[in-house]
Amino acid sequence: MTLYAELLSKGASDQRRLVHVERDQTRAILTLCDPEQLNPLSAGLMVQLQAHVMDLTADTSLDLQ
């Protein structure tokens, strides 16, 4: 297994909610939610962040300007 694949697997298995999405009509706010660790860009946080960004960019109701 490559290092990248290992990091993806580790990140995907992290069950903590590390990214919070708040939607308000045509806008969305992403908040990093790991304050005890000072929100490091860990594998888990990055996997969740990427998934939320992909969902938001596919949402046609959002104003992406």
Image (cartoon, rainbow, N blue to C red):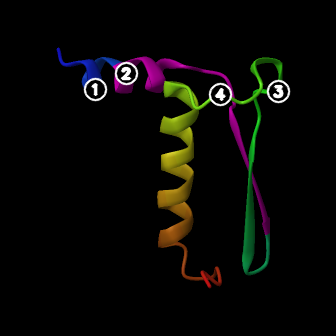
- Magenta-colored stretch includes residue 22: yes
Instruction: Report the magenta residues as a range.
Output: 7-23
Asked whether the beta carbons under mark 4 and mark 2 sit within 8 Å of each other, the answer is no
Q: Nearer the viewer, residue 29 or 61?
A: 29
Disc number for residue 4: 1
Disc nearest the viewer among 4 and 2: 4
Query: What is the CA distance from the residue labelled 4 to the residue labelled 2?
Result: 14 Å
Q: Give me the residue at 62% from left, 85% from top.
A: 65
Residue ID for mark 4? 40
Question: Which amino acid, by three-letter code, is at mark 1?
Answer: Tyr
Element on which disc 2 rests? helix
Asked whether the beta carbons under mark 4 and mark 1 sit within 8 Å of each other, the answer is no
Residue ID for mark 3? 35
Query: What is the CA distance from the residue labelled 3 to the residue labelled 2?
Result: 21 Å
Question: Which amino acid, by three-letter code, is at mark 2?
Answer: Leu
Dot 3, how many residues are within 10 Å of its Cα: few (below 14), some (14-19), or many (20+)?
A: few
